[in-house]
Amino acid sequence: MTGHSDYADVVIVGGGMVGLALACALRNTGLRIVVIERNEPQVRKSLGRDCRVSAIVRGNVRILEGLGVWKYLQDDASPMRQMRIWDNQEAGGIRFDAAEIGEDALGFLIENSCTQRAMHKAMLESDDVEFCCPAEISSVEWQQDQVSVKLADGRVLHTPLIVGADGGRSWLRGQAGIDCWQRDYKQKGIVATVRPEYPHRGNAFQRFLPTGPLAMLPMTDDLCSIVWSAENSEAERLMGMDDDAFLDALNLTFGPILGRINAAGDRAAFPLKGQLAKHFVRERVALVGDAAHCIHPLAGLGVNLGLRDAMVLAQEIADAKRFDEDWGELSVLDRYMKQRLPDVLSIMGSMEGFHQIFTHTFPGLKEIRDMGMRLMGNSGAIKQLLMRNSTGLSLPVPKQIS
């Protein structure tokens, strides 16, 4: 870490997918960027694959192409050409097909560690980005025209803007005195890699159960990733099973659509919480990704929101530089916040609505739910609009920084 000036135009706290995306977006703007990451990511393997995966929607694939990341990723990405959603054991359900909106895929399923590795390669194509890992911040001090960031090794960085990309339990958010609204779903998400009997052909499946949704998502080599959301007691029961018992429970719950699921790798479980920072920005600090908002993983949209945060913030910083504005000032950062709030709130609201509709058992709710699914399935225009919104294709987010 020696040999560098103690000034950075932007300091990014957190070297996960969203922090790295922001660094990639800013790497050709002539700004000096420093990314601080506490430690190397720990990869939990399941059937030899990272059991943490993300469904990157079509619109955000265009972002990754614009960032120069996709060329390092495309061999690890499995296209989701269709998505089938159904309710418990009921017949019917909805089928979303990428061809209905003139696309080859609704999105791509990618292991998180593959995405981080690809972003890391793209980021280091520029000499203007310094990646500090392992590195720890010992203190942050806000001054009138800059932030002083002291690292544990004694180095001090001065910057007009510090960005929190350090996840749902963001340390920087706490240092900035920003509180959160929180929603505990009292559920855990169980993730694992599984091997079904039949090829998935790029189909993703989601079955809604009274205890929470079970998603079966297509990976490369005809493997699938499961995300099984269940109430805490049920999740603990499933996690406590031996491998054979878990496989039997999974087959019984998912059904025979892909034949028998023949193997399930190591399982991991994480608590499901919704969270929204009460401020996305304060003077000289901005929050992106899970540091700003966490949503239920119902549709796997969390990282997609974070990528869009990174692109909008990067464009505002680049514009401020072009017009000789101070990009750490609240007037500039407010422009980022105002652009991002409608997208974040609409996704959070729709995820909360889905959760309520599919987990409650009010009299008559099931019939309303079934009718709504039939109407949506039969309404081409509404369905196409929903698909274009959920795939991020209709959102005014820059695909590369100009």
Image: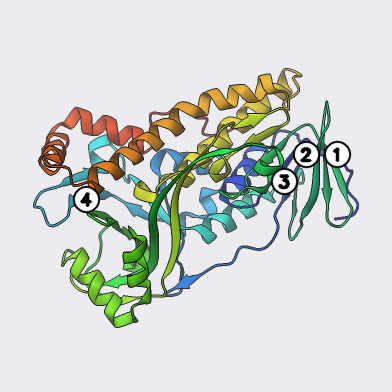
Crowd class of label 3 (few under 14; some 14 to 19; many from 20; radius 10 Å): some
Residue 7, label in figure: 1
Residue 197 quadrant: bottom left
- Residue 67 is left or right of residue 135, and the answer is left
Location of mark 3 (residue): 126
Quadrant occupied by the N terminus: bottom right
Give me the residue at 59% from left, 31% from top. Answer: 279
Do labels 2 and 1 touch, CB within 8 Å? yes
Location of mark 2 (residue): 32
Do labels 4 and 1 touch, CB within 8 Å? no
Q: CA distance from mark 4 to mark 2?
A: 45 Å
Q: Amino acid at mark 4?
A: Arg
* Mark earlier in primary sequence (4, 3): 4
Location of mark 4 (residue): 84
Q: Using the rendered image of the protein, determine whether residue 258 is visible from the camera's viewpoint.
A: no
Q: Amino acid at mark 2?
A: Arg
